Image (spheres, coloured by chain):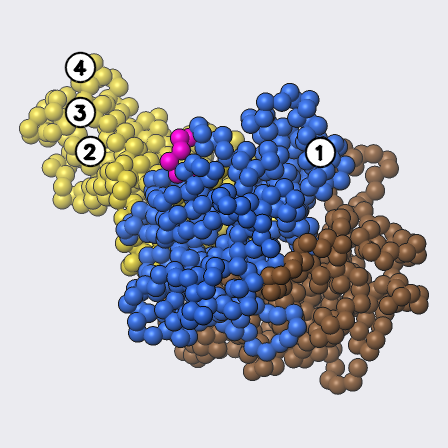
Amino acid sequence: MARPLGADDRPFDADGLVVPPAGPGEAIGSGVAFARWWRRFARNPGAVFGLIVFLTMVAMAVFAPLIAPFDPIAQGVGKPLEGPSLAHWAGTDSFGRDITSRIIYGARVALIVGIVSVFLAMVIGVTLGLISGYYGGLVDVVIMRVMDGLFAFPIIILAIAMMAVMGFGVRNVIIAVAVGFIAPFARVTRGDVLAVKEEPYIEAARLGGVRSLTIIFRHVLPNVLAPIIVQGALRVSGAIITESGLSFLGLGPPPPTPAWGRMIAEGQTFIVMAPHIATIPGIALMVAIVALNLLGDGLRDTLDPRMRR
Amino acid sequence: MAPTDAEPVLDVRGLTVEFSSEGGVLRAVDDVSFQVGRGEIVGLVGESGAGKSLTSEAILRLIRCPPGRVTGEVWFRGKNLLTLDEGALAEIRGKDIAMIFQNPGASLNPVFRVGDQMLEAMAVHLPEPRAALRERVTEILGRVGIPSPRARARDYPHQFSGGMAQRVMIGMGISCVPSLLIADEPTTALDVTIQAQVLALIRRLAREMGVAVLLVSHDLGIISQMCHRVLVMYAGRVVEAASVASVFRAPAHPYTRGLIDCLPRLDGNGRLGAIAGTMPGLAALPAGCRFHPRCPIAEPRCGVETPALRPLRAGHLAACHLAEAS
Amino acid sequence: MTGPSPLLEVEGLVKHFPVRAHPLAALSPRAVRRVVHAVDDVSFTVDPGETLGLVGESGCGKTTTGRLVLRAIEPTRGRIVFEGEDITALPASRLLPFRRKAQIVFQDPYSSLNPRMTVGAMVGEPLRTHRIARGAEAAARVRELLDMVGLSAEYAQRYPHELSGGQRQRVGIARALAAGPRLVVADEAVSALDVSVRAQILNLLVDLRERLGLAYLFVSHDLGVIRFVSHRVAVMYLGRLAEVAPADELFKQPLHPYTQALLAAIPAVGDGTTSIFDNPARLLEGELPNPIDLPRGCRFASRCPHRMAHCDEVEPALREAAPGHAVACHLYTEGGTT
């Protein structure tokens, strides 16, 4: 029967009001709210680590031509199958290509596929979720059953099937991965929309004569955005894993474009005598995934209002 | 009118509740003292943020420390509740001191039958055999006005309406014949006619069973009809303490006067008196008298010196520099 | 009644909510479709500039009535006539002009404002929706509205979580007034506020009414508030009107036994010598009957101290017992004691 107070560290502000966490719009738009959000975010070492790694990856991808010591597809820049050395920090592969440079350029593929495919999936999935959740009825049923169908397929199988039809190439990888991720976004969005649309402020908008589409995008969307962004951050790592899996299977961007997954595949043959060829891309992949997940967790802890209880 | 024994059932002295937060230490309850005698109903009235609920929770040590910190003395039948060990406190809670909250549904476990919950609560404190306790459950449910008590004891909480559930809570509270009942906004969620029944029941408990009652409410009407004495709280402090008759006949503190003027009366119109501004948050308390920024008769001295709670006439205390003693 | 034609006329308004039956019960051949009789045959008018208080306890149907009047929910039966036009069955696409002239203020200041929108955006939206003003003109009008409700212009940039309950309620009022309505439904608009803030907002609502010639349908369970703000009062019980009268008269001479019991149960500030709670004889016994399975005769009969045999048979109709004072009780129609 006892209700312990002070169970969460909710801060009091000048009016004695409890201040809820800033939403993404305010966090970015208002300087003070952003500073407050950053303070909370920065308290989580894992999240900060994730952010640093992510930013490093982005830097690697963007400045690849400047940072990479060698041309990643140039063969014979070093003796083949050489382990890590001062000249080649990560060693060379069977074609004598510098692995460090290939890792750096590989980050490009990973990030592009990861971010673009998730972004695409988000736009489509969120729109479907908004419509499905707000209008309900037959529209909702139809959309959700289609989503259920998509959910049934493991993403890798789906991607393989699509690429078998569409052919290879980065663009098709992006589309395949994006399709696989539409369903989770739609479902998460719809769930939150169902809750938000019952709130009095939505009814106020309806009674104010605001049109449904306007309500959906102007009133509902900003209030469901936080969990969607968190989902997005978390899904990027999943997209990168999927891309790596595809390129491991030989379905990714065609050679000689460096892709971590294919580098691992290529290194399989030499796993005994030159383990670094497979292991180092594997480590890079692992670090990237862990970092992105930590970043996603950190964002969820600071942005998702439901977690604040 | 209020039956008093020499020894008060509850004697609170200098109760203070502080919370540590990002902005420093916030004092949510500041040096509150009062007594409740046998069969007496004492009211704690104030608006939200005044600290009245925290006061009642602090008395029963329901506040998690840290981040809270409770100091002062709470004497109950010769023991200081704040220094008692957990075991002894658990003995007293539920048996000698009963507490009912605003939302009865939240205090009842939805997956157990009501009669069973009451039984378990009693079995903890009373050594009687279960069959005898079952009889008591039926008797108590009847006493609090629940029709067909034997059948209703086998119902689940969701089958009770708000008013009935609150009566069940009162039933649970009195099942072990407590000396003190703490009721925190017990009828806020209830309809007016049901509220009247529940409050009449509490009145009867005090009158017939001598239960001392601490009633926390924001509703001045309830306070005036229920209580013998009342303490008005503002921003964590008691600003006025007196018998109900005295307070409503001649309120001494400007906040109390303002609060009374705010009430729409059933016998007239005219503009409602209103108090400008809002109660300050704990992190931004004004210097001196906490009410002075909103006070219609504030003087420069009020912003500098915090007024102490001083007796103006017999049994009537007020914390105001400008209150007149008579 | 002479004078200007009524702003709002409600005739025979009915709202039944279907009760979702237990799936297995629906299979039974004797399954009867049960409904919650939320609003049952309610009729009243509101004149321009008039405040009609709708009062009753939980489940009486007052909130539902307020929603029906605004077509926020669809009536099961009945007519709603606003400014002489029957809006009961208008399709959503043709309701926009009505939406401009009839607005709502909600009970909960915390959930009635969009947490992700600034005050200025929310108050200004009706101006866009109804194409009243844009750009700088709209911004000026927003400032005017904020000023009208007692908030300085800087509040336009704030978010709801930065405001106190009273301030949020003022924003809600400003939003309701933005398009220049003639009728405002106040749905327990002050019930969630502290006493001193409540008084401020009530004063504000009365001031605005004088200034703008607004009519209010004021829904509340608090008789003190209703008394203060209403010209006429309608008391509801279990979906029906029990009594309708001018405010003064209702409180001085309540006719319906339910109204009398309600007034007797209100803890008004007394002098501390006696307590209404020590006199259980005047207090109402029992609980409200189930709004699904209603008794046959008068819905109040089970708790009525003046219950007669007739009351269990026939439901009393709302009839005028004195000029402008209508009551639904057999005591006043069968020549019973008054």
Q: Name the residue under label 2.
A: A102
Q: Indicate the position of residue C33 as horizontal and vertical percent values.
A: 81, 44
Comparing A151 with B101, the one in front is B101
Q: Quadrant of the C terminus of chain B?
A: bottom left
Q: What element carries label 3?
A: loop
Q: Mark 1 lies on which chain?
A: B
Q: Indicate the position of residue A301 as horizontal and vertical percent values.
A: 36, 42
Q: What's the CA distance linking mark 3 and mark 2?
A: 10 Å
Comparing B194 with A226, the one in front is B194
Q: Which residue is drawn at 14% across and 28% down?
A: A90
Tag of residue B139: 1
Q: Colour of chain A?
A: yellow
How many numbered marks appear? 4
Instruction: Examine the structure image and report whether residue B27 is included in the region drawn in magenta.
Output: no
Q: Is mark 1 on a helix, strand or loop?
A: helix
Q: What element carries label 4?
A: loop
* Relative to B77, residue B284 above or below: below
Kindly tell me whether residue B221 is visible in this rendering: no
Asked if labels 2 and 3 touch by Cβ distance under 8 angstroms, the answer is yes
Q: What element carries label 2?
A: helix
Q: How crowded is mark 3: few (under 14 residues within 10 Å), some or many (20 or more)?
A: many
Q: What stretch is highlighted in magenta?
A: B81-86
Q: Which residue is drawn at 32% across and 27% down?
A: A248
Tag of residue A193: none
Left/right of residue A218 with respect to residue A109 in the rendered view: right
Camera-near label (1 vs 2) is 1
